[in-house]
Amino acid sequence: MRRLRVLALCNETLVPPETMEGYSEKEIDEWKTEFDVISTLREMGHSVHVLGLSDDLTPIREAILKRDPHIAFNLLEEFHGVVTYDHAIVSYLELMRLPYTGCNPRGMLLSKDKALTKKILAFHRIPSPRFTVFPLGRKVVRPKRLQFPIFVKSVIDDASLAISQSSVVWDDRELAQRVAFVHEHTQADALAEEFIEGREFYVGVLGNERLQTLPIWELRFTKSDVPIIATRKVKWDRKYQQKLGVETGPAEGLSQEQQRRIARLCKKVYQALGMSGYARMDLRMRPDGRIYVLEANANPNLSYGEDFAESAHAAGITYEDLLSKILGLGLRYRAPWKL
């Protein structure tokens, strides 16, 4: 790939230092994705200007006019402290006619709203757990079709915010308590869905029109029999990970037909939500082999050594090649202004 002028967009609190030396693991975890992507792009010969953002669009416009970048590498997960505003930044990049990496605004908007995602999946007859939404401030009345156990989470928040082992409830009293907890801690509606007991899979997808799925990855607890749930502690607490023996790696024991079925399902979700660039699909498989789609995640974690990059590596795609593919997809995406 030719050398590019890249405008790297990230939260102003996550602008990485030049080196990891002198920082603790906890400090590094905060900005590791940004560090890995930016430092690798520079090592690949690209000219990278890092722009930290908070609540003002002016710096983006100024950087575009002054530096004339070929593309923006979008590492933002929120804007103005609101996670659902990230799609607005991509919309602004389209208004400025600047190519960008990752998902387009519509795909980001649809996939970020978990309830809307599930409605779209239902329309396309894509298997997903039964669900209902409990609006903020409303009384909790469970519909009869929704049977226990039930998993409760925020409709919009990601990174497993407000998710713990207590998110799985077994009666109406626990359901009301957990919904109240989600309302209080996220200030958002609560999504309650049938809890699918079984194996948890993650599948990376790359592409715009032509799609490529990465090897199926699985979350496992090797030292505990607690239900396999990707809680916030499971994702970010190293001591807790060691306690449960949290591991992720290639899913084993799946037949070729099961792998093909999962790959087709993930591509169908990607297309139904109008996604582009790259994404990660979260799925569950019951012991009887039935597959359910839990979520579609636009612009997942790109840290070196994490699930998405590791599954790409298992497919023969190095970290440098992965970033090159993502840049290429961003440059080739047919945004409305290009038409």
Image: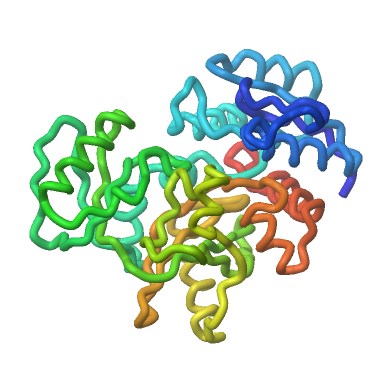
The picture places residue 286, in percent across and down from the top left corner, at 36, 75
Relative height, residue 142 to residue 7 (above, below): below
Which residue shows up at 27% across the image and 54% down it?
168
Q: Is residue 329 left or right of residue 255?
A: right
Q: Is residue 329 left or right of residue 142?
A: right
Q: Is residue 109 left or right of residue 251?
A: left
Q: Quadrant of the C terminus?
A: top right
Q: Is residue 301 left or right of residue 183?
A: right
Which residue shows up at 40% across the image and 56% down it?
229
Which residue shows up at 73% across the image and 19% down it?
63
Q: Nearer the viewer, residue 176 or 138?
A: 176
Answer with the quarter of the image where residue 161 lies. top left
Which residue shows up at 54% across the image and 56% down it?
280
The picture places residue 132, in percent across and down from the top left corner, at 20, 51
Answer with the quarter of the image where residue 27 lies. top right
Residue 227 in view: yes
Q: Nearer the viewer, residue 319 or 287?
A: 287
* Number of marks: 0
The picture places residue 193, in percent across and down from the top left corner, at 26, 56
Relative height, residue 112 to residue 258 (above, below): above
